Image (cartoon, helix red, strand yellow):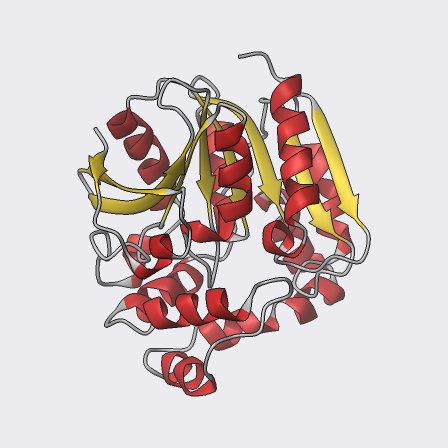
Amino acid sequence: MALPGSTTAASARCPGLAPIRIPTAAGTFDAVAAGPRHGRKVLMLHGFPEFGIAWEAQLRALGAAGFRAVAPDQRGYSPGVRPAGARNYTLDHPVRDVLAMADALGWSRFDLAGHDWGAAVGWIAAARHPNRVRSLTAVSVPHLGAFAHALRTDPEQQRASQYMDVFRQPSPVPEENILRSGPPTLPGVPQHRSEEYFRRLSEPGALTAALNWYRANDFTGYEEPVTVPTLFIAGTRDPMVAPSGVLATGDWVRGPYRLAHLPGLEHTVPEQAPAVTTALIRGHLASVPR
């Protein structure tokens, strides 16, 4: 079951979104939610360095349209689910978290959306659990089969992913460098939101946990095709994702598939282009029978 959560600084800046807590065997996840409890269920997963509030615009729109949309702070980002050690952040763990959160919320079937690391989790969850995941919307990160192949063979993707090697350095080297740099500048993300991300990642253990996602994963071992209806949204100017993986993603989807290639957009698509992202998600959900 979902329990009421105390109002945080983040939720205070997002009036109309309800802070909730989702207890699971792994710990209790913080989340924000919108829409009626009886509405069609949508789980929305964030990436780095964001939190669930990155989906604010989409949560509001989906909630107003009658959906029940929930965006948790993922493993490591929620203080209640912040285990020590990189081994606890291999992608199998957050995939299991998705099912555990859905169970706690009482959702037998749900639509899944993910951006960045959230997209990586979404690809695996949708491939492994089509009986639970009704549809997938992945933003920015290709299917991991396509992405891993691009990392092995495409010099452009190898150059674009060099930042991961920096993040994978032993603690506290990257943590100190990131915290010394101050709030990040992210395309389309308001300054107050970047400051909120930075504040929360500055809490003890938070940034190390977030970076452990990079330390624990090389994106291999997830060559599982997706059979559920899938929308992939990608910006044409994403500095972190080369076109090869984006274009090859369709080879890994066996069900209905659409690639929405957005000219001029970078990596933080949901926040850089909230109206377009929301419209695409709404259209995708409308195309998939409940």
Residue 24 picture location, percent across and down: 20, 37
How many numbered discs sit on the rendered protein? 0
Residue 260 in the figure: left or right of residue 59? right
Residue at 39%, 24% in the rendered image: 36
Residue at 45%, 82% in the rendered image: 182
Q: Quadrant of the N terminus?
A: top left
Depth check, front residue: 2 or 214: 2
Looking at the image, the residue that sits furthest to the front is: 15
Quadrant assignment, res 289: top right
Residue 273 picture location, percent across and down: 68, 51
Depth check, front residue: 169 or 2: 2
Q: Would you place residue 88 above or below residue 169 in this image?
A: above
Residue 236 in the figure: left or right of residue 90? right
Depth check, front residue: 287 or 93: 287
Quadrant assignment, res 10: bottom left
Looking at the image, the residue that sits furthest to the right is: 263
Q: Would you place residue 211 above or below residue 284 in this image?
A: below
Quadrant assignment, res 226: top right
Residue 154 picture location, percent across and down: 74, 60
Q: Would you place residue 190 above or below residue 177 in this image?
A: above
Looking at the image, the residue that sits furthest to the top is: 289
Residue 27 picture location, percent across and down: 19, 45
Residue 229 in the figure: left or right of residue 262? left
Residue at 53%, 69% in the rendered image: 164
